[in-house]
């Protein structure tokens, strides 16, 4: 069985994850629906898959890791570790702005 099929099988075996993701999307973030590939990414990560998500600024990347982290914790499936270059990017941008022209 391929890795993708294993994750889909785990997701099918845990139907709470689908409703949990939509509930969190609405109750915590105030959105009624996922955009673009967000839903597939969220469900893949909730089912235990890994993801490298590349989206433009404002594309909704943060939901792709925040919702799975909240859902897995809420269902007693452990914690999530997110590695993000955002802080480094913000420091670089601040440093560029502070340089004399």
Image (tube, rainbow, N blue to C red):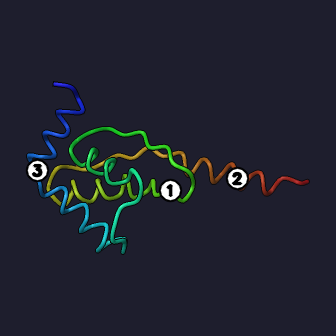
Alpha carbon separation for disc pair 1 and 2: 20 Å
Left/right of residue 10 with respect to residue 71 in the rendered view: left
Q: Position of residue 26 (x, y in %)?
A: 30, 72
- Proximity of marks 2 and 3: CB atoms separated by less than 8 Å: no
**What residue sits 63% from the left and 54% below the top?**
90
Question: Which secondary structure, mark 2?
Answer: helix
Are dots 1 and 3 in contact, CB under 8 Å? Answer: no
Query: Which quarter of the rendering shows the N terminus?
Result: top left
Q: Quadrant of residue 76?
A: bottom left
At which x and y percent is residue 52?
42, 39
- Across and down, in percent, residue 50 comes to 32, 38
State the SS at label 1: loop
- Closer to the N terminus: mark 1 or mark 3? 3
Question: Nearer the viewer's eye, disc 2 or disc 3?
Answer: 3
Report the residue at 8% width, 46% height from top. Answer: 13
Residue 25 coordinates in the image, percent (x, y): 31, 67
> Please, which residue is most extreme toward the top here?
1
Q: Residue furthest left?
A: 13
- Give above or below for 34 relative to 31: above
Q: Is residue 61 left or right of residue 42?
A: right
User: For residue 59, which numbered disc appears in the image?
Assistant: 1
Mark pair 2, 3: CA separation: 42 Å
Q: Earlier in the sequence, mark 2 or mark 3?
A: 3
**Mark 2 or mark 1, which is nearer the start of the sequence?**
1
Task: Please give the residue where the numbered disc 3 appears in the rendered image.
Answer: 14
Q: CA distance from mark 1 to mark 3?
A: 27 Å
Residue 93 marker: 2
């Amino acid at each position: 069985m391929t890795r993708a099929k294993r994750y889909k099988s785990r997701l099918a075996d845990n139907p709470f994850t689908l409703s949990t993701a939509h509930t969190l999307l609405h109750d915590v973030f105030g959105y009624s629906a996922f955009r673009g590939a967000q839903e597939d990414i969220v469900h893949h990560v909730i089912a235990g898959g890994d993801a490298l998500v590349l989206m433009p600024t404002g594309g909704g990347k943060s939901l792709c890791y925040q919702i799975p982290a909240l859902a897995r914790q809420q269902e007693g499936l452990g914690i999530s570790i997110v590695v993000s270059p955002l802080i480094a990017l913000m420091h670089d941008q601040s440093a560029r702005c502070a340089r004399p022209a």
